Every structure is written in C-alpha cells, then in structure tokens.
C-alpha cells in the first residue's frame, strides 16, 4: 500500500484519491495505525479541495460500514427518517416521528444532543421523566416494527468511524467542510436502513448554514450520496432567523410538541410538521398531491392518535406517561420574568442566535458534549416577526432557575428583539425545496 504521506500529499495538491487509497487510509485510522495528526492533515486538505462524487461515495461507504447497518427488510412498509441541520426552538422531530408512524411509515430515528446554540432532540426527550434514549439495537428494531417508530441516540455500533472523525473535526477547524458534513450525516442515516430521508436544511442567523447558497450546496451533496445508495432525499430549506415556534428550551419544547400532537395548531411548528409528512407521502406515492398529503397529516394530528402513539412509545422507552397527560410533572424552572416592549411598533427581528446563546447561559444548553443541562429553563416567545406590538406588551418570558445565570443570559438578549416604527413583512418559513 502507498505511504500515508503520499495519500495526504495528493489530496493537498488536489489530486483525486483512488478508492483503494481512501479505504486504506480510513481503515488504518479506525484500527489505530494512522495517527490523529495525519488524519487532521487529511481533513484540512479535504476542507480546501473537497471530494469528487466518486471519492465522496467511497468515503461515506467506509464510514457507513465501519459499524452495524440496521436491516428492516422484515417490515412491509416504507422506512424513512428526518434530519435537521439544527436550529433554535427546532422540535419538529418529536411530533413528526409519531405522525409519520400514524400515516403508515416506519421511522427508526437516531438523533443527537444539542451543542452550542442549537438544541438536541435527545435532550428534549430526556426532559420527560424516565425516558431512555439509550436502548439496544434489538429493542429499537422491535419498537420500530411494533409501534412504527422509536427515537434513540447514536450507539457505539452505528458508524463508529464518524464518531471519531467528528471529534477530530471539532478541534481542527474543519467542521464546516461540506463533504464531511454530508458524509457524517448520511453515514448515520443510511445505517438506519432507511429508503427515504426528509432533510430540513435550516438557513439563517440561528442556523449552521448562514446563507441559502451554502445550504443548497450541502443539500445537493447529500442528495448525491442518497442517489448513490438508493435512498431518496427530499429537502426543505427553512428559515432560522428567528426561533422556530414559541418555545425555546427542552421541557418547554416538549410541551409545544404535545400541543401539536394533540391537534392544536401551533404556527410554524404545525406548518413544518405537516409539510414534511406531506412531502414524504407524495414521494412514496401514498398521495397524489402535496395538498392531499397536508389534509391527511392535519386530520391525523387532529384525531389525537398521534399523541397516543407518542405516549405509547414514551412509556415503552421508560418515560412516565403521567407527565405527558399532566404537564405539571414535567421539569419547569421555578422563576419567570417578562421582558416588555419599550415602544409601539412592529417586530422587525427576533434573533435566533441570541436566544440560542442565552439558553446556554441559563443552563439549558451546552458548550461541550459532557456538560449537564437544566431541562426546565428557556424562553416563551410572545411576539414574532411582523406582529404589531404596543409599549408595555410582553415580548418574551424568561424561565430561569438561577438569578446569576439570568443576568448573564440577559447580556445576550439586549438587542435580540428589534422593534420598527413601520410595518414589517412576515418572513416565509419555507424558503424552497430541492
């Protein structure tokens, strides 16, 4: 085999690597023959020179098959999942998974934890007393088959090479590499044994992708990988300039998700949940049009069956169902403060990134994976962009546990909400599709 040095040098000089070189290089890293400093050099070379479609397929394949690939061939139905690139107040996975299951899909959802300003589905689920996201693969498979969905965290058996590479990318300033982002996401999703993926690609101030152009490039890269592995990838580009919905914070977002599952219409949250379900139904030929899909999804939510399905799954994964029926049993910060409007006008901005950073300061988010979080803190957004506001009206409510943390959080919120003296047009939530 070629020297590691020569393989790194080729990618540094923008020479395409052979499949054999990529396989040998990644296998050597997984087995410990290749050092972190050599892999760091390769990651930086990829950051600057990217990967062509063939290289990307081989790279993703090595990550995918570095661990166990789930097999749902015993299920007679469409096996799908959803992935979001992350945002503030983004709780869509929680109502969407049981909705898809109620509509006839099977959803093996493997999610992540929050890091930085973006929240994590696992942290939200764990705010339900007793809910375990750490179940073995056999039980996970059983729940998907019998309930229609299950929601867990990444196990040591799923794409272990991705876990090692992600940790290294995090400390070598190469996280933003689009081929590495795409390979990371797709290797984990493909390992679920899915045939379809709904990608919610967030764009805006509170998103990882700040511009539509960069978001589109990532989406196209993920679709390329999906095509290479016979998995359809639907893409919705969605606005993340302001927090999604009205709740920011783990337990608060569970409550808002319960509202949606119980048939109450929550602007933005219900809209996006229904649109994603409709998109997948149309893709797999379950409906003839998006409009028909929207109607079926909305009817399912209003029926209460989606909530019952989620309640069943929560109990089977150790959660206390009484906390879903009686929300006073969910964690809640014992102190609140309302932030009032200083003038009349129209809401011009509700800065998602500021609220995401402030949530970390309250204790509801983390800067390191090992940080603990307070599930009961967060924000209730009372006014959204485009809405009229009068002086003295509540803009948002802060739910907090520590006065010291509140003061630190407020520093990030000084200019988070901007009021304009003239009317402001409401921004579209869904920016387009692919």
Image (cartoon, grey):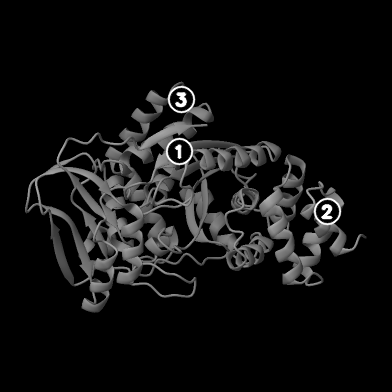
Tag nearer the camera, 1 or 3: 1
Residue where numbered disc 2 is placed:
10
Could you tell me if the residues under marks 1 and 3 are in contact, i.e. CB atoms within 8 Å?
Answer: no
Using a 10 Å C-alpha cutoff, classify the residue at mark 3 as few (fewer than 14 neighbours), some (14 to 19) or many (20 or more).
some
Q: Nearer the viewer, residue 41 or 271?
A: 41
Residue where numbered disc 1 is placed:
237
Indicate left or right for 50 with 244 as reference.
right
Q: Looking at the picture, how far across and down is residue 240, in whole percent?
A: 38, 46
Q: Quick check: 382 above or below 408?
A: above
Residue drawn 65% across the image and 48% down it: 179
Q: How many marks?
A: 3
Residue drawn 35% across the image and 45% down it: 306
Label 1: element kind: strand
Could you tell me if the residues under marks 1 and 2 are in contact, i.e. CB atoms within 8 Å?
Answer: no
Q: Looking at the picture, how far across and down is residue 278, in whole percent?
A: 42, 32
Using a 10 Å C-alpha cutoff, classify the residue at mark 2 as few (fewer than 14 neighbours), some (14 to 19) or many (20 or more).
some
Could you tell me if the residues under marks 2 and 3 are in contact, i.e. CB atoms within 8 Å?
Answer: no
């Amino acid at each position: 085999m070629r020297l590691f040095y020569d393989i790194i040098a080729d990618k540094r000089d923008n020479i395409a690597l052979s499949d054999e070189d990529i396989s040998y290089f990644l296998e050597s890293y997984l087995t410990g023959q290749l050092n972190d400093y050599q892999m760091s050099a390769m990651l930086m070379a990829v950051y600057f020179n990217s990967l062509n479609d063939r290289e990307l397929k081989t790279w993703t394949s090595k990550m995918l098959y570095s661990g166990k690939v789930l097999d749902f061939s015993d299920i007679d139905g469409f096996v799908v999942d959803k992935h979001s690139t992350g945002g503030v107040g983004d709780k869509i996975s929680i109502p969407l998974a049981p909705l898809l299951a109620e509509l006839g899909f099977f959803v093996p959802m493997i999610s992540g934890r929050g890091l930085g300003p973006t929240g994590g589905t696992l942290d939200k689920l764990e705010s339900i007393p007793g809910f375990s996201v750490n179940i073995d693969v056999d039980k996970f498979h059983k729940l998907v088959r019998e309930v229609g969905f299950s929601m867990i965290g990444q196990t040591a058996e799923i794409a272990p090479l991705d876990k090692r590479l992600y940790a290294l990318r995090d400390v070598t300033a190469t996280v933003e590499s689009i081929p590495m982002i795409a390979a990371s996401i797709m290797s984990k999703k493909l390992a679920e044994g899915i045939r379809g993926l709904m990608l919610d690609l967030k764009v805006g101030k509170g998103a990882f992708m700040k511009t539509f152009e960069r978001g589109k490039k990532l989406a196209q890269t993920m679709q390329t990988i999906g095509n290479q592995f016979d998995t359809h990838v639907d893409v919705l580009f969605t606005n993340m300039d302001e927090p999604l919905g009205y709740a920011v914070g783990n337990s608060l977002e569970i409550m808002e998700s319960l509202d949606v599952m119980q048939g109450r219409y929550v602007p933005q949250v219900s809209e996006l949940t229904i649109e994603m379900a409709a998109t997948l139904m149309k893709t797999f030929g379950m409906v003839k049009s998006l409009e028909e899909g929207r109607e079926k999804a909305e009817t399912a939510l209003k029926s209460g069956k989606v909530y019952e399905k989620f309640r069943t799954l929560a109990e089977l994964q150790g959660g206390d169902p009484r906390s879903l029926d009686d929300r006073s049993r969910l964690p809640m910060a014992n102190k609140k403060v309302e932030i009032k409007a200083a003038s009349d006008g129209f809401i011009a901005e509700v800065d998602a990134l500021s609220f995401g950073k402030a949530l970390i300061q309250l204790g509801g988010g983390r800067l390191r994976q090992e940080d603990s979080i307070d599930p009961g803190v967060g924000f209730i957004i009372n006014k959204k962009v485009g809405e009229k506001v009068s002086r003295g009206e509540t803009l948002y409510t802060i739910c907090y546990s520590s006065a010291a943390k509140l003061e630190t959080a407020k520093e990030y919120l000084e200019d988070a909400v901007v009021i304009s003296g003239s009317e402001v047009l409401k921004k579209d939530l869904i920016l387009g599709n692919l």
